[in-house]
Amino acid sequence: DDVPHGLLGVVAATAAGAAASAAVGVGATQLTPARGALLGAVVAAVAALVAVGVGFMVATAEPEPGRRDRLSPAYHACLGVALPLALAAPVGYLVALSVAG
């Protein structure tokens, strides 16, 4: 109940990634709009799924002994942004190689 992400967030991120990449594919020479949509959908889905996982991890983390809070807000923000991008980048690179190549 404390996690603000879920299936709707993953679906919305996947659709937004597909739409944005398809729009880029319209003007690209090596990438068709369909392949661009596939690339964007996969990368956005991976990033969204990792973000949901991070949300669950932060929501269920146990506090350290002697501390009242679970994780600091800065730590949560860093995990919520950096980890999905770090894990989606290699996936995006591999998918880009396969659809453009």
Image (cartoon, rainbow, N blue to C red):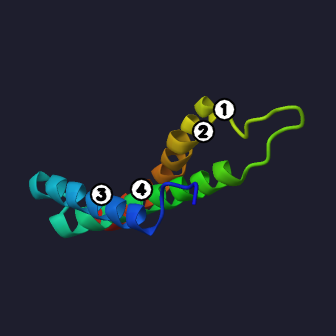
Residue depicted at 46% across the width and 55% down the height: 47
The earlier-in-sequence mark between 4 and 3 is 3
How far is disc 2 from disc 1 in space, using C-alphas? 6 Å
Depth check, front residue: 62 or 97: 62
Q: Quadrant of residue 29?
A: bottom left
Check disc 1: other Cα within 10 Å, few if <14, some if 14-19, many if 20+: few
Q: Give the position of the C terminus as an image quadrant.
A: bottom left
Which percent across, then down, holds residue 85?
48, 46
- On the question of residue 101 being in view, the answer is no
| Mark whose residue sits in front, 3 or 1 | 1
Q: Would you name the residue on which mark 2 appears?
A: 76
How far is disc 4 from disc 1 in space, using C-alphas? 30 Å
The earlier-in-sequence mark between 3 and 2 is 3
Q: Would you name the residue on which mark 4 appears?
A: 92
| Mark whose residue sits in front, 3 or 2 | 2
Label 3 element class? helix
How far is disc 3 from disc 2 in space, using C-alphas? 24 Å
The earlier-in-sequence mark between 4 and 1 is 1
Residue depicted at 63% across the width and 34% down the height: 75
Q: Mark 3–mark 1 contact, CB under 8 Å?
A: no
Q: Mark 2–mark 1 contact, CB under 8 Å?
A: yes
- On the question of residue 48 being in view, the answer is yes
Q: Amino acid at mark 2?
A: His
How far is disc 2 from disc 4 in space, using C-alphas? 24 Å
Q: Would you name the residue on which mark 1 appears?
A: 72
Q: Would you name the residue on which mark 3 appears?
A: 17
